[in-house]
Image (spheres, rainbow, N blue to C red):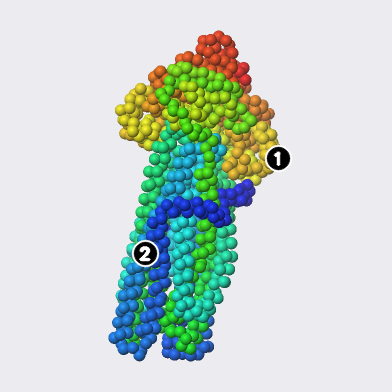
Amino acid sequence: MKGLSLFAARLARYKGWVFGVVVSIVIVDLIGLVPPWVLGDAVDYLRKGGSEGRTIAIFALAVVGVEICRACMRFTWRRIAWDFSRRVELDLRNEFFAKSVKLPPAFFDRTTIGDLMSRATSDIDQVRMFFGMGLLTLFDTLTIVVTTFPILIWLNPRLTLYTTLPLPFLAVICWRIFMETHRRSRAVQEQYGDLTARVIENLNGIRVVKAYATEAVEVERFEELSDVQVSLSLRLARIQAVFFPVFTIVLETGTLLVLWIGGSGVVRGDLTVGDFVRYTWYLGWLTGPMVGLGWTLSLYQRGIASMERLNQILLRPDPEDAPAGDAAPGAIEFRDLTFSFGEGRPDALEHVSFSVPAGSKVAVVGRTGSGKTTLVQLLPRLYEPPRGAVFIGGRDVRDISAAALRRLIAFVPQDGFLFSDTLAENVGFAFESPDAAAVEAASRAACLDEAVQRFPLKYEQIVGERGVTLSGGQKQRACLARAFAADAPILVLDDAFSSVDAETEERVVANLRVAGKGKTVFVISHRLSSVMDANLIVVLDKGRVAATGTHEELLRRGGIYAELWRKQQLQEALR
Amino acid sequence: MKGLTHTAFMEEDVKRGFDPRLARRFFGYVLRYKRLLFTATSLLFLFRVSAIAAPFLTKLAVDKYMNHPELELGARLAGIHWLAAAFFAVMMVKILTHYSETLATQTIGQRVMHDLRMDVFRHLQTLSSSYFSRNPVGRLMTRVTSDVSALNEMLTSGVVALAGDIVTLLAAFGIMFALDWRLTLVTLTVTPFMLIASRIFRHYASHIHRITRAKIARLAAYLSENLAGMKVVQLYRREKENARRFDEYGRDLYRTQLRATFYSAIFFPFVDVMRASAVALIVWYGGGRVMQDAIPLGTLIAFISYVELSFHPLRELAEKYNVLQSAMAAAEKIFGVLDEKPEVLDPAQPAALPDVKGEIAFENVTFAYDVGNDVLHDITLRVKPGEMVALVGPTGSGKTSIVNLLCRFWDVRLGKVLVDGHDVRHVAQRDLRRRIAIVLQDVFLFTGTVAENIAMGDRTMSRERIEAAARAVHADTFIRSLPGAYDARVSERGSTFSAGQRQLIAFARAWAADPRIIILDEATSNIDTETELLIQDAMRTLLAGRTSIVIAHRLSTIQRADRIVVLHHGKIIEQGKHGELVAAKGMYAKLHELQFEEREQASATA
């Protein structure tokens, strides 16, 4: 019952709700006992030759009246129960979100978004189902069994023995059927995923398919998957189709027994017709919850499995962090930094040492894979550098809390990631409610403003799939503007101009010279014209510092930098 | 609620009124399974009729035997036993018919889905590149998957259930009328209230469900976006603020869901009250009739059961309508794809393309992807069999367009493209492409084994040939080092392979196809020296004795070419041998210095 404790803690949080659900359900079920009784009385009254219109009208009114009371209670009950399960869902989702924003990038490198999303959606859904329908059905079943069963025994003990004996088995069988249904439908869904993936792959590779004229084989391969989908779906249909017969056999065998034994009892005079009617109704009442009990069991099992998957995320320890506090900008220093992405992985950076006075511009150049991005990502502790290797203002970054550290650094990552929100929100991302003037100033500095002015809604334009699609260059400029708007003392541009044309890059760099006065700027760029004015250029090669110096010094010295520079000069000439 | 408006998410959820043409076309698919359909319909009818027999048997038991003290005891008991037997028989019929009907209906549904899916998929294979450039993959994918499922939904839980419900209603009311038409009419007085209530409910529910779906989509989008951009979120310390917004979206959804609950929390109890009212009417009016001895007691009891039976279908009618609407929208989209005509068509009588020598000719070719925006202008280019031509030029100069025209992915606007003197528009696309192998820069590997990727759809290709191909292009060694060697699975489009390895597999694929013409778009990515040398050598083997057009990025490739064609803004501006062009000090000389030397050096120093 390890599972139960998983839920118990969560249930305890919602004591009030659970109480509300239980009370209302008990009331609804108790009221529900009345109509069959009234109907039974009515039948007996008529059979005995009752002839008073008024009495029968009272019976009729009683039926409606009771049902209205019950309807009101059921309304309340549904509201409470749904509200409760939705609240559980809401809380779980928020917990999930709150935890994921704390997890380090290294976690996201290892986990796919699809996996996280399926936990956040279908697993939370399963847990909600248990807390909603699952608990509800459980209490419903308990109440009905406790109330109806004594009535049945009181009406006819022998008959009740026969008719209720199969009911527990029904619960077990239903539970098995539900579990099997769940298993099979999972198989269908998984295979449906394969089928969908196949279609996507075919459409993405349609050029190759056409080039090699292999359409027929593609159709054949798809047909095989489609056939499997058909047979899996029919396998599911076969188990689903079993449910009705099982349910009917148990339910109607009961009715049959009532008709047969009870009917004979009426004939013999042991039982009134009214009791016969009542008995049929109450027995029907008992059957539904037995199915429900089976269902609850399967919901419980699935809910536990999902809760465990959720806890794998929710119970992850938060990454280590220094106590909150202020951090001061200042010189940046790398002291014999050696870094690898994990145990057993090769070193991405080896013995990197250099220092940058506050307020200067540093450029990091080198080929793809030389460690440029890794180096700058250690500054805001996106990845945790070793102790005693990276310093800002004389303090080890490991001793500064992530929040304080990141307040010092405005970072433009390589991939121009924007949210599908308005441009104003994206550019002012560093602020909860960005100031319109600041957003515009930053956008002007990033040369984004002209593009924005052409959008129908200007800065209120939503970008991304549901709004305007920005070009690669526009996206990068928006990311630049976002960093400018943050107005932090340290600015890191990780290849932030790769999709921006040279002319615009030059303009942005010129703007930066003015706006970035007094800031420490880290630039990674492939276009050397924008790094030549740096106070310090660090040339990285395979994770090591190959050379440092100013533009002139490096040119004089020859080597990688001088070579790169010559080629770019040529490129300029060609344009 | 800044930024995201929920209306933005609502476009997807299209509904459509009933369209008889679409319905007829869809039922054309269903009618392919006439026998199954007949079986399913008959079983459905039997099931629904047997389902309403039970209350009638109870009525007989009450009226004929229980409530007949004048009959002798033995006869009454025997009657009860017989009725119990009949009840048992009905139960068995019910179970069997329901089970087989469900299977029959599901089989039809699955078969029809399969047929539709295959038709759409097959048709997509025939459509031209222009169609795929207009329609994003995601959209086309839904046509094959979820739209088809929506139609199945309509068939199995829509039409069939509707038919069944109608049978139940007709049969139940039929029996009730036969038993006592006056009582039936009195009972029916609640129906208008029911219908009105379910209409109102349907109106609100479908509206609120649409909003709910949109809000769920928004929440999921926000979450996945945050997960994808977590670095940015953390860098800009937006953890709390974004969590607050996520909570806000969540609460907004929660409120909407509660509103949805409100409607169903009112509607379903209301239905129960209506049903109770019907029962009350039966007790009151029917009770009176029993007192007057106009009807027997059993009829009254049976009526109560029939009300129970017929309320369920009445309540369901509203649901069915929604299913139908969504299915109509899906049908329209699916048949829209099926009606799409390919722009590049095979000729009615394709000319035979016998053994190709490999001669290529572009004659005054002008071409545009969009009308009025020519990307190739009056290109004339002849390639002799066995010749290797290197295409060189800056991005956007028209290199890829030349390839697209040669493979006839698109058609020329003016002029013609000839292979061995045959206009490519006069031969079957399949015949043409069988003679051409193409190696794209970004090598596309399919899910499956390495061997399957080399055979590229030719299922009859022998293992020997596949391995020979791999050996010829130096792919054999690395493939053998994989777990499973040639049977190693390619996952996620081959992302586990290096760019160089993917290139080698693509070479093997081309070699195995043994075409007369090879088109090669050289990879620009950095490849380690060792693999680079293998690739250079493999390319030599692959191109030997074949006509080839290479979009070149490497000096060694260009130097080996028989001819270099320099493209600029869709025109050929220079052509000749490497040495000649360098000496001419034109565009090529500059390009050469810039692009090719760098790579050579990069790979030499790496």
Three-letter code, disc 2: Thr
Q: Are marks 1 and 2 on the same chain?
A: no
- Compared to residue B474, the image places residue B79 above or below, namely below
**Front-lying residue, A396 or B592:** B592
For label 1, the SS is helix
- Do we see residue B374 in this rendering? yes
Figure quadrant of residue A429: top right
Rendering coords of residue B42 (x, y %): 40, 63
Figure quadrant of residue B397: top right
State left or right for residue A561 relative to residue B504.
Answer: right
**Front-lying residue, B498 or B351:** B351
Figure quadrant of residue A447: top right
**Front-lying residue, A322 or A15:** A15
- Compared to residue A90, the image places residue A474 above or below, namely above
**Residues at marks 1 and 2 touching, judged by CB atoms closer than 8 Å:** no
Q: Which residue is mark 1?
A: A437
**Separation of disc 1 and disc 2 at Cα?**
73 Å
To which chain does the residue with label 1 belong?
A
- Do we see residue A65 in this rendering? no
To which chain does the residue with label 2 belong?
B
